[in-house]
Image: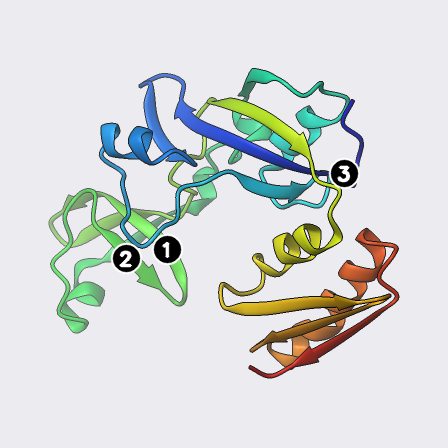
Amino acid sequence: MIKKRDFIEIEYTAIIEDTNQVFDTTDEETAKSANIFDKNQKYKPVIICVGEAQILKGLDDSLIEKDFKEDRITLTPENAFGKKNPKLLHLISQSSFKKQNIHPYPGLQINLDGILGIVRTVTPGRVIVDFNHPLAGKTITYKIKIIREVTNDKEKLDSLLSFYTKDFKTEINQDEAVISANIPKQLQDDLKKKVTDLIPSIKKVAIKKE
């Protein structure tokens, strides 16, 4: 039975319920079949710490007290990417786009002050941009396979590091974890606390710039 703060290895495929469209998966063949294959992504099972917000909260909560098996979990919009918020539909003048040499059309993704949005409608002089998450308002189904509980401390450590950087090396010497990676200074204290909280056998963490 899975408990909060357990480390587990999972495979999953995420599907938009009303269109049956796959938008995320850990399986390479599924990604290719759904035309979402990314050659820069590694398709393999992932290790997560349950209850630590490493996946959607609704899915995270659903895993607690599950058995190790294949399952199908359906999340309402509230438990997935949220409901559509009408306040996040912004009316922007055509002139604002012309100043940036952008020709808006429905479906165009734009970045406005670091916030991603999608152009929904274009009329003479005005453009409506939707800053909701692209999957807001959607019911999501996860086909998930819970493979095993992870008990090896180095596997746990590596899984935590993967949420901070993709390029790292780790080793554990008795009760000290030594991490070689380029971790921004403002994140180092958070990482050290997370490691010692979630892996009690590790008492000290040293971070070296790679």
- Amino acid at pointer 1: Leu
Question: Mark 2 or mark 3, which is nearer the start of the sequence?
Answer: 3
Residue 200, quarter of the rendered image: bottom right
- Amino acid at pointer 3: Asp
Is residue 58 in view? no
Element type at mark 1: strand
Q: Position of residue 74 (x, y in %)?
A: 54, 18
What is the C-alpha distance between the residues marked 1 and 2?
Answer: 6 Å
Q: Residue at x 34, y 28 (%)?
A: 22
Per the rendering, the mark at residue 6 is 3
- Amino acid at pointer 2: Ile
Residue 149, quarter of the rendered image: top right
Please say if the residues under marks 1 and 2 sit with CB atoms less than 8 Å apart: yes
Q: Residue at x 24, y 28 (%)?
A: 33
Question: Mark 2 or mark 1, which is nearer the start of the sequence?
Answer: 2
From the image, tell me which residue sits under label 1. Answer: 116
Question: Mark 1 or mark 3, which is nearer the start of the sequence?
Answer: 3
